[in-house]
Every structure is written in C-alpha cells, then in structure tokens.
Image (tube, grey):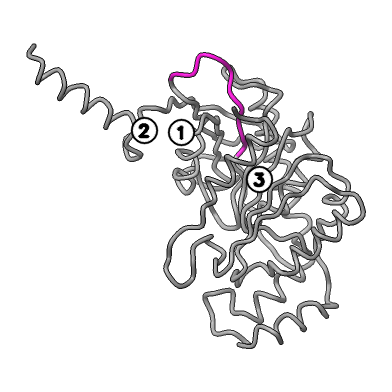
Amino acid sequence: MSAIVGAILVALAGVLTFHPARPLYTRHREIQVVSRDGTLLSATLSLPRWNRSSVPAVVLVHGSGRLSRDHVRGDVRSLVRAGVGVVAYDKRGVAASAGTYPSGGGAAADSVLRVLADDAAAVFDSLRVQNGVDSTRVGYFGASQASWIIPLAAERSSASPRFQVILSGAAVSTGEEAFYSALTGDGIRPPQLTSAAEIAIRTRAFAGPPGFDPRPLLSATHVPTLWLLGEADQSVPTFRSAEVLDSLRAVGALSHTVISYPRVGHDLRNVDTGNPAPIWTDVLTWLKSIRVID
C-alpha cells in the first residue's frame, strides 16, 4: 500500500468516525423496560464506542406529543460525542412501545404527567444498572413538557438523579402555561394579544385552574438542575419561569441554575436569524462545573 493510499484511508476513516450522519463513535444496545403498571417500553442505550471506563448517562425525556426515539437522534449524537451515554425510548403507545398513549389537559394533566413520570423513572432505574454506565453520574435530560415530568420522575426513581437538564421548560403550572400559550397563539396560531406587556400582565394575574404545579417539587429538590430558556418563547412564559426559580433560590432552593437567551424561541433558535442558541456549550460547561464530566 502506498503512502498516498494509506493517507486517504486514514482521512476517510476520520470522516466516517466523526461525521454526525454516520456516528461510528456510538455503539447502541436495545433494551426493554417494564414501567410501574407493567407496560413494556422499547429503548436504545447509546454509549461512546471507545470509552473503556464507565460513563455518565442521561434518560432523554420527551416533550409533548406522540414521540419516539427517532425524534431525538440529534440530542443523542451531541451527548454521546461529549462522552455522555443516553437512553432514548419510545413513549408508551408509540412506535415499538406497548400501552396506550396518555393524553389530556386541564384537570387531566396531573394524571397524564404522573403516568409519563412513572415511565421515565423506570427507564432511569434500568439505565443505572447497564454495563458501561457509571451509576453515580446518571441524570435526566429533556425539553418542554419534560420540565414537569422530570421532577415527578426524580421523586419516583429508586435513587436520586445526580443532575437534571431542562430545555425550554416551565416552572409554572400547566394551567398558567396553557393560558399564556392561548394569549400568544403558541407560535402556531394567531395570537389573542400582540402586546408583550399586556401578555405579561395577564399571565401574572392568572387565577384559573392550575392543573399540575411543579413548584413544591422544585422547591424541595437538592438535585443540581440546569434550565435553558428562550426569552421569546411563545409556548412557555419564560419570564414567569425565571421569576419562580428566582423566588425559590431566594428562599434557599439553590439547586437551580438558569440561563436565558434573548430573542430565542421555544426551539432554542434565534427568532430573527434562525441560528441555534449555544446550548451544547452551556450544557457541557455546566456538567463540568458540577463534576459530572471532565
């Protein structure tokens, strides 16, 4: 083999190893998880291929909707490339998971979230005992609706999570979030109001049925939790979530770290340019600060 051919093969190997569309840096393992009510959930554990020691890992908790593992491939790849294992699962009643997909808002939101939290907790408990996973560095990672599911799941897990990362999350009740979304149009419908000041006034004055309120759990947790919030979010009232979390820290709940991005929406992209917020830089910096990764 000539030196030139050898160099070409080495270069091609590098492309295949690190190109995100062909993630040879990842090894996958299919697992089955039994939830509290006996429902069988299908999941994939993804680990860094060449790590010889056990790695930190997360349960990737979905947002709202009928979502499967396929919907979170990008997050899985980003985390594994950073040296973090990930288990992603199909929601119950979706794709390869058994059971019936739970749905319902308003008064039904509490029961729906508790079912989904039981599923996330079961996946967490399974993740902790997987080969290649450091059971002392296992946490939750999720977006949107996951901000309500994760605190509930942490309470139901057999062991406390080491950390939690919440993207575009709501620290307010499901009732308040739904009220805000109705005012703004949730980014997909014509808004009831266009004045940001008036929307803020009305949201702060919300006095309707709260549904599920995460504040008691958020106040009590000692798990380090990172919140990444877009200030132009039309689904979640970021200003209210920030106020809630600030108030919790003021009375001693110091576990919550909040990073807010100006002009960034629910998808954590700039609403003017479409460019993504630097979420991965911030997540990895924070994980290093709490000594989950090196």
Residue 223 drawn above or below residue 213: above
Q: Residue 144: x percent and y percent?
A: 63, 57
Query: How far, Cα to Cα, is label 2 from label 1?
Result: 9 Å
Which mark's residue is nearer the viewer, 2 or 1?
Answer: 1
Q: Residue drawn at (61%, 27%), measured in percent from left and top?
A: 56
Q: Residue furthest right?
A: 251
Q: Residue drawn at (49%, 18%), measured in percent from left and top?
A: 51
Q: Is 41 covered by the magenta stretch?
A: no
Residue identifier under label 1: 81
Residue 165, label in figure? 3
Q: Amino acid at mark 3?
A: Val
Q: Are the residues tagged 1 and 3 within 8 Å (C-beta)? A: no
**In this rendering, position of residue 227 left or right of residue 249:** left
Query: How far, Cα to Cα, is label 2 from label 3?
Result: 23 Å
Residue identifier under label 2: 23
Quarter the C terminus occupies: top right
User: Which residue is at the front of the view, 135 or 116?
Assistant: 135
Q: Residue 111: x percent and y percent?
A: 77, 55
Category of crowding for the residue at label 2, using alpha-carbon neighbours closer than 10 angstroms: few (below 14), some (14–19), many (at least 20): some
First in sequence: mark 1 vs mark 3 = 1
Q: Amino acid at mark 1?
A: Arg
SS state under label 1:
helix
Q: Are the residues tagged 2 and 1 within 8 Å (C-beta)? A: yes
User: Which residue is at the front of the view, 271 or 175?
Assistant: 271
Q: Residue 254: x percent and y percent?
A: 83, 47
Q: Residue drawn at (66%, 27%), measured in percent from left and top?
A: 126
Q: Which residues are magenta?
A: 50-59
Q: Amino acid at mark 2?
A: Pro
